[in-house]
Image: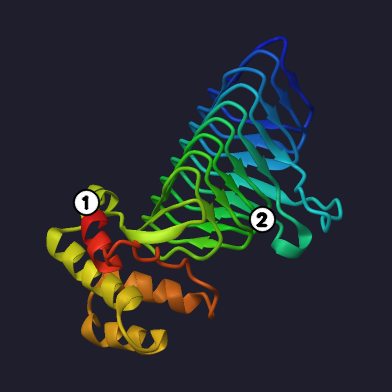
Amino acid sequence: MAEIDPTALVETGAAIDTDVEIGPYCVIGRNVAIGAGCRLVAHVHLTGHTSIGPRTVIYPFASLGTPPQSIRYRGGATRLVIGAQCQIREGVTMNTGTEDGGGVTSVGDRGFFMAGSHVAHDCTVGNDVTFANNAVLGGHVTVGDNVILGGQVAVHQRVRIGEGSMIGGMTGVEGDVVPFALVAGNRGRLVGLNRVGLRRRGITHVEIHRLRRAYMVLFHGEGRFADRIDMIVREFEHDPVVGRIIAFIRDGGGRPLMKVRAPRQKGASEHMELNGAA
């Protein structure tokens, strides 16, 4: 049976599962569904057509399911769907979708959303992500599994961030980020591969070496980019890890990719810099 503090306001119609704890001064709307074992610490605001997966913990002053911050939103019953076992810290905000964007904002399982982070309308966020303090997404952004966004990262609307990538703090992300990449800079640029993240996911040294070879050919090779893609496909035809990068690029339909950091001014080549960073 749910444990609800007497100061909390839960509207008639809200679906509260078993073993849910709703702390002081929380406000829960009539179209909200809260899964088993969730905990709302205090001062949590849940509204709109919002569902929270089991065993998710939400901290004070988070506001989830509010209308999209879009002038095209027409007041429809769009949704926010949050997965299981997420940690949603203080002041996090997540909006529902828009009618023209598919109508759903979706967040996967086991996400860790630190204080002040934001998921905008019509975003799709994968599993096991980490958003550091004040990391924010524009509308229609897609974030793959195991992505890490550093503090103060700002992602432009409609950008795709591939699985396993890591974005350094205080970075603006304007182009699609291929899987497993490492991004840094005021205006984000590719600076290598997220080798630490790859190792944590059980990717072997040999696989990382092949992935790095493919990365260097794609982003530092000569000739047309389309020809370099074809070269990688031929060379790594049976490599599933490299294949994820190729699939990501092709699924983008010609969308602009994140650029590579320019070479250093004092003779150090981009190739040398990446050797150190990758």
Q: Residue at x 23, y 67 (%)?
A: 212
Which image quadrant is residue 174 in? bottom right
Specify whether 149 is left or right of 71: left
Image vertical order of residue 2 relative to residue 161, above or below? above
Q: Quadrant of the N terminus?
A: top right
Visible residue check, residue 180: no
For marks 1 and 2, the one nearer the N-term is: 2
Kind of residue indicated by mark 1:
Arg
Residue 96 image point, x, y percent: 70, 48
Q: Residue at x 70, y 15 (%)?
A: 25
Q: Residue at x 66, y 49 (%)?
A: 120
Which image quadrant is residue 243 in? bottom left
Image vertical order of residue 122 relative to residue 168, above or below? below
Q: Residues within 10 Å of mark 1 (few under 14, many from 20)?
A: few
Which image quadrant is residue 203 in? bottom left
Q: Which mark is residue 139?
A: 2
Q: Quadrant of the C terminus?
A: bottom left
Q: Between marks 1 and 2, how big is the CA–CA gap? A: 31 Å
Residue 256 image point, x, y percent: 53, 73
Residue at the spot of label 1: 199
Q: Residues within 10 Å of mark 2 (few under 14, many from 20)?
A: many
Specify whether 149 is left or right of 27: left
Disc 2 secondary structure class: loop
Kind of residue indicated by mark 2:
Gly
